[in-house]
């Protein structure tokens, strides 16, 4: 158990709808990253939040947006869902305050599997 | 694609044998990590190697890094059925963005 929890575990939406996925970071972690993992592929970086500000973004369109709250929990919002958005969405928390190696280690939740029909 | 590459894509071995998987990445890094994933669930961190290190050990795991070739390898010695999983490398050039490889699916037969 990593201490990172995601909800819901599964979700079915139709094309054009909007979805919000939630993540609760491991206690004491101030950084959260979101990844999209298509079937049979590795995770692709969506964005990262540090102290409630976006700290970096991958090659995803603006309809992917996020929030980080003062208690370091986080949301991923996706608007205007497309069929290709069907994937496992993973959040990972880490702590920039830790030492040189430890701050780079990410602790992943079990993911939310999103199906877009 | 922004992903790194791993090979082989799939590997099937007998319990007790060693498993070796390789990873190539595209940009300069300051560290490279290996993660394990069981059945499409969350990833679990295994080991981190810094760009100025060439080899690192942790239990039955041995990782090598060749920055001149932009490649890394993960060796699992004396494999067990419980090692069956997908293994991913993640190359990091800073503390916010990691590029994961496409993964190696390892199956260890009892």
Image (tube, rainbow, N blue to C red):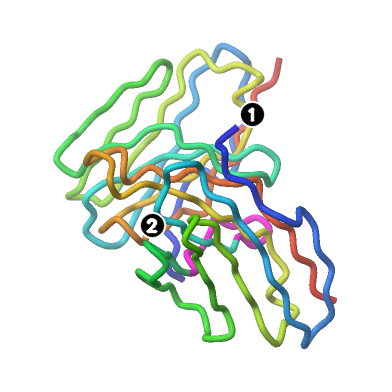
Foreground residue among B51 and B78: B51
Judged left or right of residue A12, residue A56 is left
Asked if the magenta segment contains residue A43, the reply would be: yes
What residue is drawn where x is 47% and y is 61%? Answer: A70
Where is mark 2, residue-wise? B98
Q: Judging from the image, what secondary structure is the residue with disc 2 in?
A: strand
Instruction: Give the position of the N terminus of chain A as an image quadrant.
Output: top right
Indicate the secondary structure of the residue bearing disc 1.
loop
| Cβ atoms at labels 2 and 1 below 8 Å apart | no
The reply, left or right, for residue B93 in relation to residue A9 is left
- Per the rendered image, the range of residues in magenta is A37-46
- Identify the main secondary structure in magenta: loop
In this view, the residue farthest toward the front is: A70
Q: In the rendered view, tell whether residue B98 sits above or below residue B18.
A: below
Q: Going 63% across and 75% down the picture, which residue do you hit?
A: A77
* Residue found 41% across the figure and 27% down from its top: B75
Give the vertical position of B103 relative to B82 (above or below). Answer: below
Chain of the residue on which disc 2 is drawn: B
**Residue under label 1:** B84
Where residue B90 appears, as percent x and y from the top left, is: 40, 50
Camera-side residue of A114 and A95: A95
């Amino acid at each position: 158990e990593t201490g990172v929890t995601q909800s819901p575990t599964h979700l079915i939406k139709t094309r054009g709808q909007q979805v919000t996925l939630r993540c609760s970071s491991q206690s004491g972690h101030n950084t959260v990253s979101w990844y999209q993992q298509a079937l049979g592929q590795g995770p692709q970086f969506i964005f990262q939040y540090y102290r409630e500000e976006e700290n970096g973004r991958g090659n995803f369109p603006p309809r992917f947006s996020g929030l980080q709250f003062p208690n370091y929990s986080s949301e991923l919002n996706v608007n205007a869902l497309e069929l290709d958005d069907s994937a496992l969405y993973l959040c990972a928390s880490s702590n920039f305050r830790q030492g040189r190696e430890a701050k780079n280690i990410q602790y992943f939740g079990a993911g939310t599997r999103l199906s877009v029909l | 694609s922004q992903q790194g590459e791993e090979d082989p894509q799939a590997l099937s071995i007998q319990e007790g044998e060693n498993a070796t998987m390789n990873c190539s990445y595209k940009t300069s890094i300051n560290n490279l990590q290996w993660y394990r994933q069981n059945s499409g669930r969350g990833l679990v961190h295994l080991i981190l190697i810094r760009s100025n290190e060439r080899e690192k050990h942790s239990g039955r795991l041995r990782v090598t890094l060749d920055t001149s070739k932009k490649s890394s390898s993960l060796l699992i010695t004396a494999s067990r059925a419980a090692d069956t999983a997908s293994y991913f490398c993640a190359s990091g050039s800073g503390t916010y963005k990691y590029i994961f490889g496409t993964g190696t699916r390892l199956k260890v037969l009892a």
